[in-house]
Image: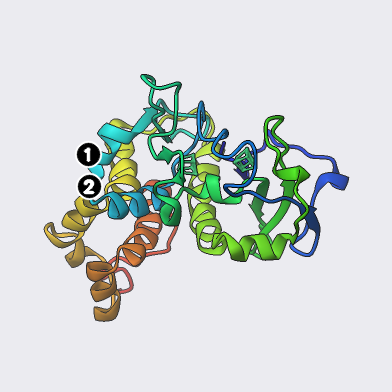
Amino acid sequence: MNYDTGSDPRISLEKSDRMSREDCFQFYCGPSVPCFTECCRKLDLTLTPYDVMRLCKRLDVSSSDFLDDYAVIRGVSRHGFPEVSLKMDTRDENLCPFVASSGCNVYDDRPGACRIYPLGRASSKNRSTDANEEFYFVVKEEHCRGFEQAKNWMVNEWISDQDLDLYNRLNDELMELYMLGFRRGSAEFSTQQLQMFMMACYNLPKFRDFVFRTSFLRKFELSPEQIELIRQNDLSLLEFAFKWLKFALFGIPVLELKGANQG
Ligand code: SF4
Ligand code: SF4
């Protein structure tokens, strides 16, 4: 159910289906709809690194326990990286492990894919301006009665109601890595590179240990303020992890090595 297409080149939509943040759609979801929680089963629900970070905190579990108990790690995709999705409960009609009759048990920390529905988002980087460009579209699932409810939204209102801007920003970072991987063509990442990706994206405590308990900080030019931020703040650490992967896997100069400018 991850309708954020990122820069997936397979997605093409009629221009007339594309919506800007100022366009409107009709939808309501809540306990009063007859299909309430019907959609929380049999899902192919991609979990982004930020989703996993929020859910680990919410459930008070370690990243490795979360990945063992709640996730499926799929083999490498066309961009060359593994993808992580939420494990449905096969003993119970393939229900999402977080659904209850009263709704979502992790509502405040539900994944981005659950927040954005019934919209999808496509984004790509404009190569000349380096800015992210996006459009939205409505995804109508047959079983979803939310479209029959008399409530109108502007796309912008939905984004704000679902707190999507932060999810979108972090998702764009992941999509940029995917796109860089995609552009490499058929060259596969080594096992070590894939382990770096999984650690930096999906195991932040291990990545923090890697930064602070190895020679890492002796190699990179980082200000004391940056170092304190990534020591204390998980979101800053995740943003730094994306940077490090761009530098380490693709050679993009978003980090500076110590002594690099000395003649
Ligand atoms: S995380 Fe919550 S909203 Fe998303 S599928 Fe599971 S129960 Fe439904
Ligand atoms: S099927 Fe649609 S309206 Fe029903 S609970 Fe899911 S998102 Fe809400």
Taking the image as drawn, is residue 117 in sight?
yes
Disc 1 element: helix
Q: Quadrant of residue 172?
A: bottom right
Q: Which mark is residue 65?
A: 1
Residue 101 placement, left or right of 52: right
Number of marks in picture: 2
For image coordinates 66% across by 57% down, the residue present is 127
From the viewer's side, name the closer residue of 122 and 106.
Answer: 106
20 in relation to 34, above or below: below
Foreground residue, 132 or 149? 149
Residue where numbered disc 2 is placed: 61
Task: Choose between 155 and 10: the one closer to the eye.
Answer: 155
Left or right placement of residue 181 versus residue 21 in this view: left
Disc 2 and disc 1: Cα gap in Å? Answer: 6 Å
Question: In percent of the image, x 44 and y 42: which residue is there?
Answer: 47
- Residue 193 locus on image (x, y percent): 32, 39
Q: Is residue 72 above or below residue 235?
A: above
The verdict on label 2 being within 8 Å of ligand 1 is no
Q: Residues within 10 Å of mark 1 (few under 14, many from 20)?
A: few
Please say if the residues under marks 2 and 1 sit with CB atoms less than 8 Å apart: yes
Task: Check disc 2 and give the amino acid type.
Answer: Val
